[in-house]
Amino acid sequence: MNKPVFNPFNPVFRANPYPFYEALREQDPVHTTELGGIVLTRYEDVSSTLRSNDFSRDIEATANEPTDPLWIAKRERRKGREGAKTILNLDPPDHTRLRRLVSKAFTPTSIDRLRPRIQQLVDDVLDQAAKNGGMELVDKMAFPIPFQVISDLLAMPTDRSDELREWGQLITLSLEPTSTLEDLDRTDGALNEMIPYLFTIIEDRRAHPGDDLLSALIAVEDEGDNLGLDELISFVVLLYIAGHETTVNLIGNSINALLRFPDQLSLWHNNPSIANRAVDELLRFDGPVQQTVRVPIVPVTYQSLHGPITVQPGTIVTTLLGAGNHDPAMFADPHTLKLDRANSNRHLAFAGGIHYCLGASLAKLEAEIAVGTMVKRFPNMKAVGDITWRDRLTIRGVDHLQLEF
Ligand code: HEM
């Protein structure tokens, strides 16, 4: 049998990465790639790496200079990009400062206040879909609901939603390991349109503040040097994109999973109180973010199958969240969806440690209401025609799913 490799350029891998994760985990859990990076697939390795202080998330500053010509060109391109790093790419103490400024708005209690509004949005979509006898899930529900909710939080106008949706998709292209230089051009093009757009809104809001998250962040910026204008803009870009690009996939992937396991759809329909745990299991089963990276700042040792492997500072370590979430050592019978699984909340879909997803409570609430209400109202829903997927690995999700109720 061939030794398994981590090759995101293989379209079969991208279409369904789980069998590849399994082969890696079983045969080479601390895998060295052709370019000298490390790929981790065991739950314990992924989880401990994300939680460890021995790693940096500031890849541009800490990773070794690449040797591959494409990666050299990509790195140069990123260095030339305007604007501040986002919270996602910062290490302490800058990360700690920014995270403290924004975490209050995202606590489970402040997020739970959004429940009635989200329920109303979902009910309106489903009332219309009921009249039509069905709907296309992504365009009618999975995109518009999270998009409206993040727009509400920031009190952003929604008249340019089509453009914002496209910018979001182009900006996240740069997160894909398979991205080309042309893709990075597209990312830069989208940022060059989105940043001036946000700038105009921020200036207007500075003059007319309201009771919204953007006004609160501007107030922090106005108060002194705690949050710079470029940091503020980068943060809003990140919030906007993280606020809908990922949740869209949670809703899409969840309905896809429930259609594959109709007994679980019935279980939820008959036991609405399992909603919170059910969403954790759906995040575990096919999460929207499949991988992230870290760079060790001191030598770090992992146990491979044939003894210890020490990884040197500067090496790019890819943690495959989706692989950890399907590790049988942590989750028994991992390829089966079990909405009442006792330990599903140990999943890694929101990563872990200091960069643990800031929007986790919001994403979970949106999915609980959107998917839960569909399960309650349309337990016999079925897919019509082919389900298509976005051809991406870092952010994995359903692209098109026509439903009949
Ligand atoms: C199902 C939906 C979502 C998933 C699967 C998801 C996943 C993730 C993951 C894996 C990370 C950590 C990445 C890393 O450590 O390298 C992260 C960070 C982050 N997420 Fe989410 N996310 C989701 C929804 C959201 C939403 C709705 C928001 C905001 C409204 C959000 C805002 C953020 C922010 C700001 C960070 C950076 C946190 C930091 O670096 O301290 N996410 N997310």
Image: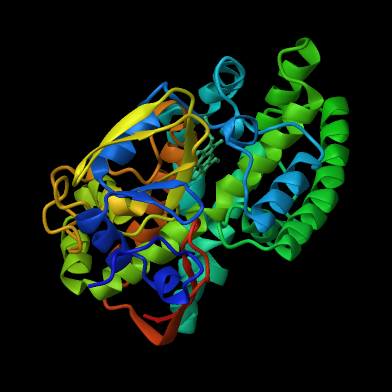
Q: Could you tell me residue 66's position as x and y percent?
A: 62, 45
284 to the left or right of 221? left
Q: Nearer the viewer, residue 244 or 178?
A: 178
Placement of the N terminus among the 4 image quadrants: bottom left
Q: Could you tell me residue 375's position as x and y percent?
A: 30, 65
In the picture as drawn, the residue positioned furthest to the bottom comes out as 385
Residue 377 shows in the view? no
Colouring method of the image: rainbow
50 to the left or right of 65? left
Q: At 40% across and 39% down in the image, what residue appears? A: 351
Please count the marks in the image: 0
Q: At 56% across and 61% down in the image, what residue appears? A: 143
Q: Nearer the viewer, residue 176 or 269?
A: 176
Q: Nearer the viewer, residue 37 or 101?
A: 37
Q: Nearer the viewer, residue 322 or 49?
A: 49
323 to the left or right of 162? left
Q: At 36% across and 80% down in the image, what residue appears? A: 405
As displayed, is residue 381 above or below residue 206?
below
Residue 270 shows in the view? yes
As displayed, is residue 100 above or below residue 335?
above
Q: Could you tell me residue 86's position as x and y percent?
A: 65, 33
As displayed, is residue 160 above or below residue 342?
below
